[in-house]
Image (tube, rainbow, N blue to C red):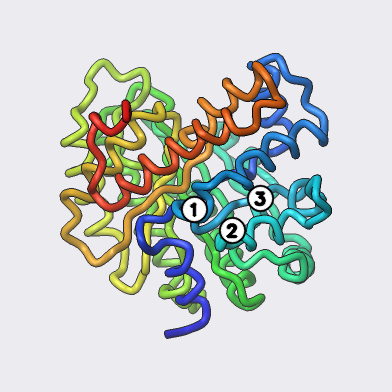
């Protein structure tokens, strides 16, 4: 077992998931504005620190993805944020891409940038305590997209990123997200997501990536949010498993789903059904942002001094998702 494989398994095992707290300052400003809280470095830290000190960090969270601002901040008790996270038993991680930009010769599509200077940034993040990283590629489904150009360009970038990360002794999260925005059917999502993931692994293998030392972070298979034909949770489960079984090599230790605009409850219920029907060797868990944080954020915004109240809400959501990651969740548990 390689050191990278050990890190990946430590993050994912025993129903633990990943807290995605890597929102950019712009995204975090929108979230805080929506609950009438000023977006200052102090307030962004205060909310995140509230989550990082919650009891469920020890039982439910195996890793936390940070943003550049946060990994450099100091907690109220004088600890670095990576130390605060490590003390709970979770692994600190870091988002390293610099965002999705217009793709040349296909300007309605995006390609993720951030490879320039990445080797040097990775050395600094490792020294700060990060042991895994994240890079996200995004793809829209329309009549003409995603194009081969977008699929190939993002897969190549994800592979080059992964090679540099593993060179630096960290585990790369590979996140090819087929967005749920649009009118597409679930079957179209299945086809395109399969194509995207298969191309990613083609590039990862070409770049000699140790597949036992990565974490895949894909979308679930869903109909577009504007589609007239929705599918059941059972169909989400079966189509997602179909996609992964034909697209992901067996060496990959685990899959941590993104929530992708699902509600908190939808993200939990779909994860649970995927695990109840999981007939693969893959660990299947969660890497959620809003689907872990949103209710806690709304509560916290009403009284930022009620730390315990916000933590209790976060603890509940984390515990529900950890049960779902083991196929042990039920709707009755939501009210206990």
Q: In which quarter of the image is the N terminus?
A: bottom left
Mark identifier at residue 66: 3
Mark 2 crowdedness (10 Å alpha carbons): few <14, some 14-19, many ≥20: some
Q: In which quarter of the image is the C terminus?
A: top left
Give me the residue at 20% from left, 27% from top.
231
Instruction: Measure how far apart labels 2 and 1 are at the Cα level.
Output: 9 Å
Mark 3 crowdedness (10 Å alpha carbons): few <14, some 14-19, many ≥20: many
Vertical comparison of 209 with 285: above or below: below
Q: Picture coordinates of residue 38 (x, y %)?
A: 78, 21
Q: Please give left or right for residue 216 compared with residue 272 in the image.
A: right
Mark 2 in CB contact with mark 1 (< 8 angstroms): yes
Give me the residue at 23% from left, 29% from top.
332
Mark 3 in CB contact with mark 2 (< 8 angstroms): no
Vertical comparison of 188 with 299: above or below: below
Q: Please give left or right for residue 253 compared with residue 298 in the image.
A: left
For discs 2 and 1, the disc positioned in front in the rendered view? 2
Mark identifier at residue 61: 1
Q: Give the quarter of the image for residue 230.
A: top left
Q: Nearer the viewer, residue 96 or 43?
A: 43
- Element marked by disc 2: loop
Q: Which residue lies furthest to the bottom in this view?
A: 1
Q: Counting residues from the N terminus, which is met first, the one under dot 3 or under dot 2?
A: 3
Residue with the mark numbered 2 = 88
Q: Counting residues from the N terminus, which is met first, the one under dot 3 or under dot 1?
A: 1
For discs 3 and 2, the disc positioned in front in the rendered view? 2
Vertical comparison of 283 with 48: above or below: below
For discs 3 and 1, the disc positioned in front in the rendered view? 1
Mark 1 crowdedness (10 Å alpha carbons): few <14, some 14-19, many ≥20: many
């Amino acid at each position: 077992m390689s050191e990278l494989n050990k890190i990946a398994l430590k993050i994912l095992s025993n129903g633990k998931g990943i807290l995605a707290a890597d929102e950019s300052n712009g995204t975090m400003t929108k979230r805080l504005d929506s609950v009438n809280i000023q977006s200052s470095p102090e307030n962004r830290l205060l909310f995140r620190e509230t989550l990082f000190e919650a009891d469920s960090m020890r039982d439910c969270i195996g890793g936390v993805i940070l943003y550049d601002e946060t990994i450099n901040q100091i907690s109220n008790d004088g600890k670095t944020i990576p130390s605060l996270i490590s003390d709970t038993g979770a692994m600190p991680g870091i988002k390293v891409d610099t965002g999705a930009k217009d793709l040349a010769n296909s300007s309605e599509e995006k390609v993720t940038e951030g490879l320039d200077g990445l080797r040097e940034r990775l050395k600094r993040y490792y020294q700060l305590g990060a042991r895994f990283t994240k890079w996200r590629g995004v793809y829209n489904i329309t009549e003409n997209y995603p194009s081969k150009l977008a699929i190939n360009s993002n897969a190549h970038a994800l592979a080059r990123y992964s090679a540099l990360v593993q060179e630096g002794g960290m585990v790369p999260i590979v996140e090819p997200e087929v967005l749920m925005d649009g009118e597409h059917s679930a079957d179209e999502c299945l086809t395109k997501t399969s194509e995207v993931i298969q191309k990613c692994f083609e590039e990862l293998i070409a770049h000699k990536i140790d597949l036992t030392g990565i974490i895949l972070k894909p979308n679930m298979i869903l109909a577009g949010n504007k589609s007239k034909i929705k599918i059941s949770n059972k169909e989400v489960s079966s189509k997602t498993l179909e996609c992964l079984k034909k697209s992901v090599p067996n060496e990959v230790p685990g899959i941590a789903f993104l929530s992708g605009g699902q509600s908190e409850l939808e993200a939990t219920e779909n994860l649970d059904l995927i695990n109840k029907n999981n007939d693969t060797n893959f660990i299947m868990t969660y890497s959620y942002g809003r689907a872990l944080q949103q209710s806690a954020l709304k509560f916290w915004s009403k009284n930022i001094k009620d730390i315990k109240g916000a933590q209790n809400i976060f603890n509940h959501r984390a515990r529900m998702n950890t049960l779902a990651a083991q196929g042990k969740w039920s709707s009755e548990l939501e009210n206990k």
